[in-house]
Amino acid sequence: MLDDVVIKADFNSIPLWDTIDYCLSQYPQIELITIAFPGEVNEQGVVNHVQRDLRDYPLGEEVQARYGMPAMIVNNVNAAVVGYGVEHPEYKNITFHSQPYGKPMGGQGNLVNGTLVTGLSGIGGELKYFLGRMQFSDDPRRLARTEQGQIELVINALLPTIALLGPEVVVLRTPMVNDMQSLEKRLANFIPAPSIPKLEFISDVNELIFEGSLQLCGQWRQKQLEVSPVESASLQYAA
């Protein structure tokens, strides 16, 4: 659901079931459930989100057992970068960086040569595994409280990605860092000017996640059904 948004401080499956129940009551022809979820998500739909006390939680299996239909679970930032790629086919190498308000670490989704990079067991884009070991001017939790501190956090998160993947554009959902010219000047201290990607700030990611989820849903369904090219096009349109 794109416009009807439910926000909870902690993960609880009951609001999720209520949302799915409502969707199925309105659209009983639904044959596949797709959920965009923060944190690590592997190909089997098992999620890990330590802050929400979710460890090896088989969300995909639980949804499928409850509703008797296939379920695809995707990382929300991965869905966002795919959605941006759908809306901007002129770019093949895209990084989407999401840094929640006041948080010391975010997550990234990456398209490389038009292909989504999820990594082994969904670890791709999980910045917490290296940012915690980097040197900062202050404790990251304190840096996260100020605009200048957030800029430092974002710069340190982007540098390895730019150096390793060389994106053409970096899309930033960073509520406390919205001055892209200032960010570009800071990046120029570390990256040669010709290699600095275009920086684009966005404030609302919901439509990109929705668009990307649909695209991933169509691709997943195509693989599952091993359909013909004609049927594939119909599936993606319907999705």
Image (tube, rainbow, N blue to C red):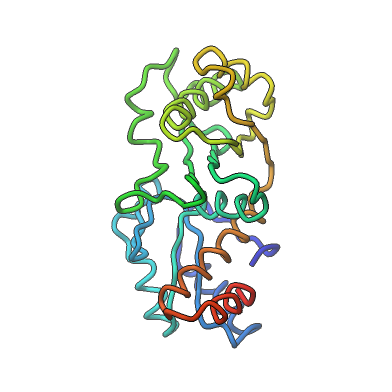
Residue occupying image coordinates x 56% and y 64%: 215
Residue at 69% over, 21% down: 181
Horizontal arrangement in the rendering, residue 99 relative to residue 138 (left or right): right
Which residue: 67% across, 26% down?
180
Does 165 appear above or below 57? above
Image quarter (top left, top right, bottom left or bottom right) of the C terminus: bottom right
Drawn side of residue 143 relative to residue 44, left or right: right
Task: Name above or below for residue 87 compared with residue 200.
Answer: below
Q: Nearer the viewer, residue 38 or 94?
A: 94
Quadrant in the picture for the N terminus: bottom right
Label tally? 0
Q: Is residue 184 shown left or right of residue 117?
A: right
| Residue 85 locus on image (x, y percent) | 60, 51
Q: Please identify the residue farthest to the bottom as the structure is shown.
A: 28
Q: Position of residue 205 (x, y in %)?
A: 64, 49
Taking depth in this image into account, of 151 and 199 the one nearest to the observer is 199
Q: Position of residue 177 (x, y in %)?
A: 63, 28
Q: Residue furthest front?
A: 229
Position above or below: 119 against 106: below
